[in-house]
Amino acid sequence: MPASVIHVDGFTKRYGRRLAADGLALDVQRGEIYGLVGADGAGKSSLMKAIAGVLSFDAGTLEVFGIRVDSERSAEQVKQRIGFLPQGLGLNLYPDLSIDENVDFFGRLRGVPDTELAGRKRLLLEMTRLDAFRQRPMRQLSGGMKQKLGLVCTLIHEPELVILDEPTTGVDPVSRRDFWAILGRLLEEKGITALVSTAYLDEADRFHRVSLFHEGRVMGQGTPAELVARVPGTLALFRAEPQAEALPVLKAAFPQTEAMGAWLRVFADGLDPVQARQALGACLAGVPGKAVRLSDWFAREPELEDVFVAMLRQRGARLDTTLEAAATTRPPDTGLAIEARALTRVFGDFRAADAVSFQVPQGEIFGLLGANGAGKTTVIKMLTGILKPSSGEGRVAGAEMRSAGSAIKERIGYMSQAFSLYHDLSVVENIRLYAGIYGLDDRRARQRSDWVIGMAGLAGYENDAAGRLPMGLRQRLALGCALVHEPRVLFLDEPTSGVDPIGRRVFWDILFHLSRREGVAILVTTHYMSEAEHCDHLALMFAGRVVADASPEAMKQQLAASIGQLLELQVDHPAQALAALHTAGFAHVALHGRAVHVLSPDAGADLRRLPALLSGAGVTVLAAGLRPLSMEDVFVQRITALEDAARRPS
Amino acid sequence: MRNGLWSPVGLRRLRVMTHKELLQLFRDAALMVFFLYSFTGDIYLAASGVSMQLKHAAIATLDGDRSFASRELAGRFQPPYFKPVGDAGSPGQAIRLLDDGDVMAVLDIPPRFNERLQRGEQVSVQMQVDTSNSVLGFLTSSYGAQIVGRYGLEVAALREGMSGAGAGPRVEADVRVWYNPNQNDAWFMGISELLTVITLFSILLPAAAMVREKERGTIEQLMVTPLSPFQILFPKVVAMTLVILAGSAIALFGVLGPLFQLPMRGSLVTFFLVTALYVFTTAGLGLLAATVARNLAQVGMLTVVILMPMLLLSGAWTPIEAMPPWMRGLAWISPLHYFLDAAYGILLKGAGLELLWDSVLAMTALGILVFGIGMRRFARQSG
């Protein structure tokens, strides 16, 4: 009989007047990987800290291993059986100690006998492939390696329960996948229960069961499949020309409509694929002016994020933005907004950017992708004039980078990942400040400030301090400040970290409007792979160089042609299935909760032969099907191949 | 250039940036409380509490003679300078009183003091002084020496048959006390503390404002706007200068003037102009510190590190002339040294710019130098 490892009921936590967790309830079974999924400030960390016994709470009951945690004493009783990895890359580790010393320290802190410590350390470091770097100080490790070391230190005393708070935030997609694979194996082998949080909704299928968090409440609980089934509907992907005309009409009828580059992505709730096709067709027939042509129709099951947004919408969240079509529509200028020609920046003997070239026409959303340290920020800094290139040329907004740096600064907008607002100034004061900096006179400043407030949905918040706004509003205010002088080119550096799905969607709607209606060129860097799909064009950076430059669609097609299509197998014994597929020669196999993902060069044949192959290993395939490739698949495959190539001696 | 520094757009930029700094400062409640306290309460405490004069120094006697003369001498150690606490009893007891800090000095009068004076012999009295506070110790011993010396003269004069003053050839020192006729310590200490507080905030406020932008990442945002490094840094200095001038006005017209009757003899316009110049000079040091510091805590530490030597080298606590030669050299680069000259000059002596031009010139030169270095470092760091 599965025993409950964690039992939470009515958990409530306040910070001053702010309610961080409001009557949370959940139940984690032994041996489960349980996920808490939600944006920053949704209450995940508060709950995790309380379960780990390091945070007091205001109301509710909390039982860990059947012991009620309500005092320092009772918390001490369970602490030895728990491993806790707090949020933040390597924050619990000691930067100046080596990998070895960090592990030893945590081992001794937890009272692991020296005789056992050595053996456990060897095993864990081997599994995480950190054993080659044992003498390296922690501060010199990459983000992914820090998180793996954090995991090792959390597991060194062989806890029965591990609590991992956002272990993959700020880690690039390749390391993230690696981390999940290692975690899955370790937990499976040791029979450990895990409570893991993530801000990435597309990681939810890594868990057996999840709780969806939003603003201190649980919106839904169950297996990812159960949650998806909770809101019936169809996800439709198609093209409609002209897209800019079709979008507002569709959005009025189907609030969950998004533009993804040249594609439209619509969640039609309550409709099956046939009904969805009819309803969308009818809706597009109502577009005023010339007829809209619908093509390339795909319909499939929605993703968790679509369902989550639908749940929030049912509770009254609104997705619409009040962006009237600009009265002063500019003549569409089709020139190049950004042109990088062999931009290079050298720091010492390190080439942070190496002959980077690309072009962004006006009106395009251009995505610059890459892991941390790949050179994205260096390129943005050169293009915005903060950093001088060592060599190479560039034109931004019609001005030469080398000779007209200050002209460029007047014509571009920039928004950083920190949403660089003055937290102690009010909404209006922030906008007016940037209006003044960009030299707008009082009348223009007032006009633009009204425009920003309307665009960002900030009406009613005008005199609130920027620091007290919810993340989504804060992000849109930062965008508004970057747009106050109506720049022709907009730079966005990791613009959506920490924002909830509703906020992210509204944000992308605005970007789409700016690019299509007002012809603004937008350069975005991101490591949210799901966001990359919104871009018209992508450049993938690796080790300072641009290694791929194409539309998301073309990149996916290239991957399908070279490596194959993605199969998802629902099986009863995922770990055995994983091993059997490896032995059968599949190079790209990954565990996602109870499902296994396989890249197959010949999908049709494999779908037929895999059930038999796996039953030979004692695994029953419950369901099997094709899944569309995601940008994350593209990114991980490309980067892994490049890393392998870099490691091989030439 | 179209949008040059002093064009309408350039001026608008300076204006909105200065306005922003003032808003941010006024909304930092903790800093404002500290600021207001420093310019009022702290200056009041310094002016009323700290004194460089000898007041009520406890003195014990060891009277080995117990005669008319010995009682007469001991009786001359009177308030307000001294506070006689009576006879110590024994030499051991006297030492203990000194050790425990119960008395400041012990006057030791030898046996046969009266008898030997009558005989016209030379007699010594011993005074043991606690000089762990060297200033008070020095004052105690010199006052003591003066009292004993005067008594000796009187005894000698009486013996020669001359009674009263002016009877014999003697030199009388006739002292005229200028600028602070009552030798009111509150004036000196009050101004000194005001200058210290001005210095503290001139370093701290711009450095804190700068490092806050670094911590929050707003500086990056400012760098991609058309603002030049000067347009980013200068408004901070302007805003902080305005605030510090306001603080100084509160200290002068709210505390030192009404409560301690500080005369303020010179032109107040000149005083505030010189103060503004000084704040600008010192703010450069703060900005320089902010290019080194990574967070507010480091700014706090750096402020202390810069402030202490500035105070020590300024001559606020010790005259420059009394310092070792190498330190005297350093004092010339402490802006506080020049400000001190100017501030005392204007407030107490009524001096004007015609007398203080050299200090003002030196301060200006130092200010431009330091601000220039700070701006270069800032531009390089973020370039």
Image (cartoon, rainbow, N blue to C red):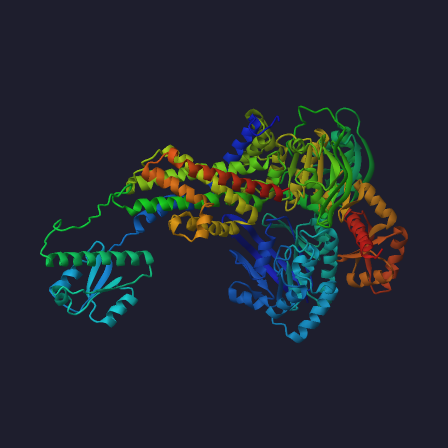
Q: Is residue A160 left or right of residue B136?
A: right
Judging depth in this view, the residue of A67 and B314 nearest the camera is: B314
Residue B9 to residue B177: above or below: above
Can you say which quadrant of the picture contains the N terminus of chain A? bottom right
Q: Position of residue A153 (x, y in %)?
A: 65, 64
The quarter of the rendered structure image containing the C terminus of chain A is: bottom right
- The residue closer to the viewer here, B36 or A274, is B36
User: How many numbered marks, from 0 up?
Assistant: 0
User: Could one spot residue B131 in this view of the protein?
Assistant: yes
Up-down: is A428 above or below A580? above
Quarter assignment of residue A355: top right
Residue A15 seen by the camera = no
Nearer to us in this view, A516 or B118: B118
Query: At x 61% / y 26%, what residue is drawn?
Result: B2
The answer to which quarter of the image holds residue B68 is: bottom left
Please tell me whether residue B244 is drawn above or below residue B295 in the rendered image. Answer: above
The relative height of residue A551 versus residue B109 in the rendered view (above or below) is above
Q: Residue A13: image x %, image y %?
A: 53, 53
Query: At which x and y percent is residue B330?
Result: 47, 49
**Image location (x, y in percent) of residue B72:** 14, 61
Of residues A178 and A36, the one drawn nearer to the viewer in this rendering: A178
Taking the view exactly as shown, the residue that stands out farthest to the bottom is A115
